[in-house]
Image: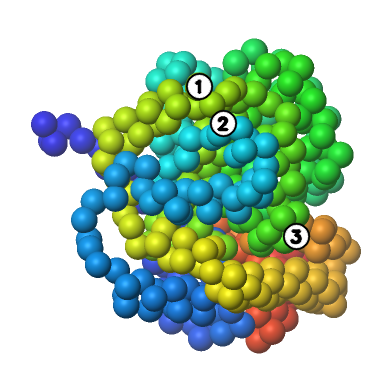
């Protein structure tokens, strides 16, 4: 049986990390995979996370199973963080929530759930979108169609193109939206644009599916949830996939949440049963540790304050790095305007340079980024910003 298998290439983004680690150049810079880095290039464990881990270690009494939905307290607190605890969908018991193995687990379980509701449903995804959206959603049987999102020429959201295309979607189609910090472009919808998307979703009877993997790394914990909350205020049915990889720094602990909003509490009970049954048929139940950390933090006023303070430092560092890079590129001397980087949000921006220029940055300068020219803003630091800026200007010549 295995003799018929054809090899597939390794994931391009993950391969980049391997190449970076092997590179002996002391000046090398990693702007590839989306992990937060501090000024020294480390991805530290957040202090609030370490405190929570110690509490868990001291207090835990069992390693027994936790059930398909995961921890009930984690699910409750995670939903409160996303929607705010007095949101109507929570009060009306319209939500079904499950703890998942990372945001990927949430996306895949949501896609499997959709396939139970409506086999081979169509989901509209932004062009571009996070590369792993495609296998995660299509692998569950969903049919992917694309709507224009990022316009390379204006370095902003092609909102007219997006709306025109979504206007052609059929009733019952799903629309995948990035809650904040669009990956890979960093270009987010404005408040006014979110309002228009909500109106379109309602008018066309579309089902919003919001992937929010960077809450707190754009404008703030509450601000970054604006679009998600507005949508939840307005629509009868909706899906959310969230991740704690970035905002809690729990990458390898695989901690995420899938939420289904149903039209009423009776429908929500049925959705819950289907969601949990879907999970049981895939990985049975999620790993416990990451979610235990998150619930310990969210359940304690002092740990919450500590965590949100650390998140503010991370968010500010990303914003400062954006300014430093744009300023550095200007100082390095190019006609081309890179100020758009300062207006974008979260971990990523496109440099909008060619694949050949991306390759030269890697081969000549040991500066690593995705082939699309997406850069991880967190990889910029005081000690490398001029090096990166000069290299970018050099390959533009
Ligand atoms: C990224 O986009 O770089 C991250 O979300 C990591 C990943 O798994 O792709």
Specify the label residue 27 is tagged with: none
Q: Is residue 40 left or right of residue 393?
A: left
Q: At x 80% / y 71%, what residue is drawn?
A: 323
Residue 237: x percent and y percent? 60, 25
Q: Is residue 262 left or right of residue 350?
A: left
Residue 263: x percent and y percent? 59, 22
Q: Is residue 156 left or right of residue 2?
A: right
Residue at which label 1 appears: 267
Residue 34: x percent and y percent? 54, 61
Determine the secondary structure under disc 3.
loop
Upstream in sequence: badge 3 or badge 2: 2
Give the answer, above or below, for where 310 lies relative to 264. Answer: below
User: What is the spatial separation of the Cα atoms under label 2 and label 1, in whole angstroms?
Assistant: 8 Å
Determine the secondary structure under disc 2.
loop
Residue 165: x percent and y percent? 73, 22
User: What is the spatial separation of the Cα atoms under label 3 and label 1, in whole angstroms?
Assistant: 34 Å
Residue at which label 3 appears: 219
Q: Is residue 356 left or right of residue 330?
A: left
Callout 1 crowding tier (Cα within 10 Å): few <14, some 14–19, many ≥20: some
Say whether residue 142 is visible.
Answer: no
Say whether residue 308 is visible.
Answer: yes
Give the answer, above or below, for where 75 lies relative to 234. Answer: below
Answer whether labels 2 and 1 touch (C-beta < 8 Å).
yes
Upstream in sequence: badge 3 or badge 1: 3
Count of numbered tags: 3
Residue at which label 2 appears: 94
Q: Quadrant of the C terminus?
A: bottom right
Q: Is mark 3 within 8 Å of ligand 1?
A: no
Answer whether labels 3 and 2 touch (C-beta < 8 Å).
no
């Amino acid at each position: 049986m295995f003799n018929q298998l054809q090899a597939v290439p390794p994931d391009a983004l993950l391969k980049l990390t391997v190449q970076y680690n092997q590179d002996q150049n002391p000046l090398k810079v990693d702007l590839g995979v989306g992990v937060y880095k501090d000024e020294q290039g480390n991805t530290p464990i957040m202090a609030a996370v370490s405190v929570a881990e110690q509490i868990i270690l001291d207090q835990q009494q069992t390693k027994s199973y936790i059930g398909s939905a995961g921890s009930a307290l984690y699910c409750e607190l995670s939903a409160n963080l996303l929607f705010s605890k007095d949101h109507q969908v929570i009060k009306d018991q319209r939500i079904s929530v499950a703890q998942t193995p990372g945001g990927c687990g949430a996306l895949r379980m949501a896609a499997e759930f959709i396939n139970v509701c409506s086999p081979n449903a169509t989901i509209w995804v932004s062009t571009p979108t996070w590369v792993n959206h495609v296998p995660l959603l299509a692998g569950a049987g969903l049919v992917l169609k694309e709507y224009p999102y990022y316009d390379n020429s204006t370095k902003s959201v092609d909102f007219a193109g997006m709306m025109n295309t979504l206007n052609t979607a059929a009733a019952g189609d799903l629309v995948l939206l990035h809650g904040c910090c669009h990956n890979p472009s960093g270009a987010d919808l404005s408040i006014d644009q979110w309002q228009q998307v909500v109106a379109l979703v309602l008018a066309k009877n579309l089902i919003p599916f919001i992937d929010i993997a960077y809450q707190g790394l754009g404008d703030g914990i509450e601000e970054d949830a604006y679009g998600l909350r507005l949508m939840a205020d307005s629509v009868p049915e909706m899906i959310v996939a969230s991740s704690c990889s970035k905002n809690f720094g729990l990458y390898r602990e695989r901690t995420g949440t899938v939420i289904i909003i149903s039209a009423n509490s009776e429908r929500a009970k049925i959705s819950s049963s289907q969601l949990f049954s879907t999970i049981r048929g895939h990985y049975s139940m999620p790993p416990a540790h990451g979610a235990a950390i998150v619930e310990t933090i969210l359940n304690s006023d002092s740990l919450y304050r500590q965590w949100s303070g650390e998140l503010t430092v991370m968010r500010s560092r990303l914003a400062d790095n954006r300014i430093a890079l744009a300023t550095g590129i200007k100082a390095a001397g190019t006609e081309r305007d890179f100020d758009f980087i300062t207006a974008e949000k979260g971990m990523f921006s496109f440099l909008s340079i060619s694949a050949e220029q991306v390759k030269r940055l890697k081969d000549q300068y040991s500066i690593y980024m995705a082939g699309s020219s997406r850069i991880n803003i967190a990889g910029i630091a005081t000690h490398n910003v001029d090096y990166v800026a000069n290299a970018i200007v050099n390959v533009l010549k």
